[in-house]
Amino acid sequence: MKRLFADTAYWIALTNSFDQYHTRAVEISEALSPCRLFTTDLVLIEFLNALADNGLHIRAAAVQMVEAIMNNPQVTVVPMNRRTFMRSLALYKARPDKGYSLTDCSSMLLMREHRLSEALTTDRHFEQEGFVALLRTPARRHPTDKP
């Protein structure tokens, strides 16, 4: 079974039909089914924060999505603990030249630990660390990225 990391951008795209990546996220989800997804508490917090002020309908959909994720046996949600926080902070500190968030750092560490090479994300930071960002397409790449 395929194993992938699911980042904030993926959950947003699936939840919000107005998101520019919605169609791509749905297509990839259907193409990859079935698969085992990994995500983190921090990703879910970031997801809820991102959709908190987008109206009652989107906010309710975000809560529903998190509840569905937490109850889905095909999704492993890795909890945050002090050890994970400290290791994530160390990576954050080690990459002062990057725009990585602490959530990115935690996600990248989880991907390494679980030997995941592909992420359901649009975030080029994952590519900078050597991972494949599945939601990115050549037309949407950042102008400074190498092909």
Image (cartoon, grey):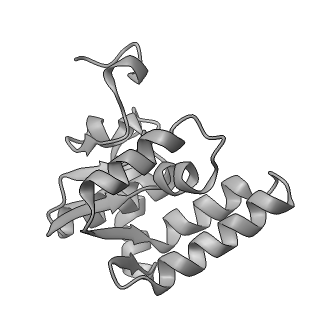
Position of residue 138 measured from the top left corner of the image (x, y, whole percent): 32, 21
Position of residue 129 measured from the top left corner of the image (x, y, whole percent): 25, 42
Identify which residue is drawn at 66% across, 41% down.
Answer: 18
Q: How many marks?
A: 0
In the rendered image, is residue 90 in sight? no
Quarter of the image where one finds residue 55: bottom right
Identify which residue is drawn at 34% across, 67% down.
Answer: 87
Identify which residue is drawn at 49% across, 41% down.
Answer: 23
Q: Nearer the viewer, residue 62 or 128?
A: 62
Position of residue 30 measured from the top left corner of the image (x, y, whole percent): 34, 55
Q: Is residue 123 found left or right of 47 in the rendered image?
A: left
Q: Nearer the viewer, residue 119 or 109?
A: 119
Identify which residue is drawn at 49% across, 82% down.
Answer: 70
* Quarter of the image that includes the N terminus: bottom left
Quarter of the image where one finds residue 19: top right
Q: Nearer the viewer, residue 8 or 22?
A: 22
Q: Is residue 50 found left or right of 12 in the rendered image?
A: right
Residue 47, placed above or below residue 38: above
In the rendered image, is residue 105 in sight? yes
* Quarter of the image that includes the C terminus: top left
Extreme-right residue of the structure? 56
Q: Is residue 30 found left or right of 118 in the rendered image?
A: right
Residue 100, placed above or below residue 91: above
Residue 111, placed above or below residue 26: below
Position of residue 33 measured from the top left corner of the image (x, y, whole percent): 27, 63
